[in-house]
Amino acid sequence: MFLYFPHMHPELSSFPPVDGGLFFDPGYSDESQGPSFRPEGLPIEPRTARKIIQDCMSFGEQFKDPHQIAYFGAQGIDDHYSGTSLSIQSELMDRLKHSTSDDEDDSAERSKAQFQLLLAWFYEQRLIELKGLESGVKSSWEKFGQSLGVDSEDDREQGAVNLGKTIANLNVPGTEDMALPWKPVLAALVPFLPDDAVLLVSSLDAVESWREDGLEFQAAADDSGLPEGLMVARAPAWKLLGSAEGGDKLYERQLAVAIIG
């Protein structure tokens, strides 16, 4: 199985698709859409997943300054909202009570991992919407310039620069600066990856980090099903995550990563 990493939405991928490549689906929607992979037996069902994420969004919307959330990061959001519908831990544990898994500890870890992936998936969804707004603003600006008789490309570019400065003064970050860190996404993915999974990596930061840690990439084998010339490496999950050593049996498993970025 070929699985794109770290993005979970085709709209955020800027590279040609690999034949058979899939995007991870953490189970937010009732049905999977597009070329995706949703593991069987996810501990959090879609209806519960949506409620948890919406509660998280409601919590975040209380703050005008995102830095204020750091206060709750220190004491734990669950502690602040203990006993309320916004207690994320309570939501997860309630779902686990109805789990059919024989290993409750394993189910708890899988639930936490799925929750992290759901947050990442939802964040990407909002990022796609923001990119759409940016595109709409740019198109409207060009039409506005044309309606005023500003036909010079240089003049339109200068107008775009001025508009960019205005947006910057409003402290609105550009979407290019809003990429999610790849390590938490990879750590959450590990419990759900099939043994034959090959991660198709588009994150240059991840590849650079692995090479600095001594990971060696080699051309994909002819029978791998990957495009000719694609560079592949294999290492324990803990090493890919930058840990000094293993310890957790789950993260001792070997993972294959291929560079497409």
Image (cartoon, helix red, strand yellow):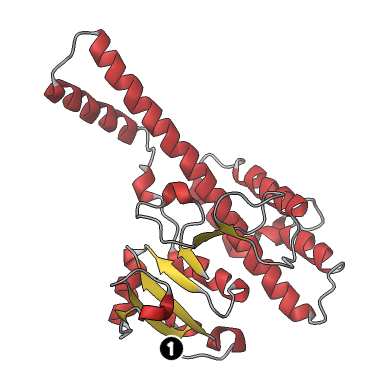
Q: Position of residue 180 (x, y in %)?
A: 45, 57
Number of marks in picture = 1
Q: Quadrant of residue 38?
A: bottom right
Q: Position of residue 89 (x, y in %)?
A: 74, 63
Query: Depth check: 145 or 257 in front?
Result: 257
Q: Quadrant of residue 58?
A: top right
Element assignment for label 1:
loop
Left-right relation of 230 to 132: left
Q: Position of residue 52 (x, y in %)?
A: 71, 52
Q: Quadrant of the C terminus?
A: bottom left
| Residue shown at the point (83%, 81%) measured from the top left | 102
Please name the amino acid that badge 1 sits on.
Answer: Ala
Residue 241 seen by the camera: no
The residue labelled by disc 1 is: 244
* Above or below: residue 173 compared with residue 147: below
Left-right relation of 186 to 57: left
Task: Name the residue furthest right.
Answer: 98
Q: Position of residue 143 (x, y in %)?
A: 30, 16
Residue 158 seen by the camera: yes
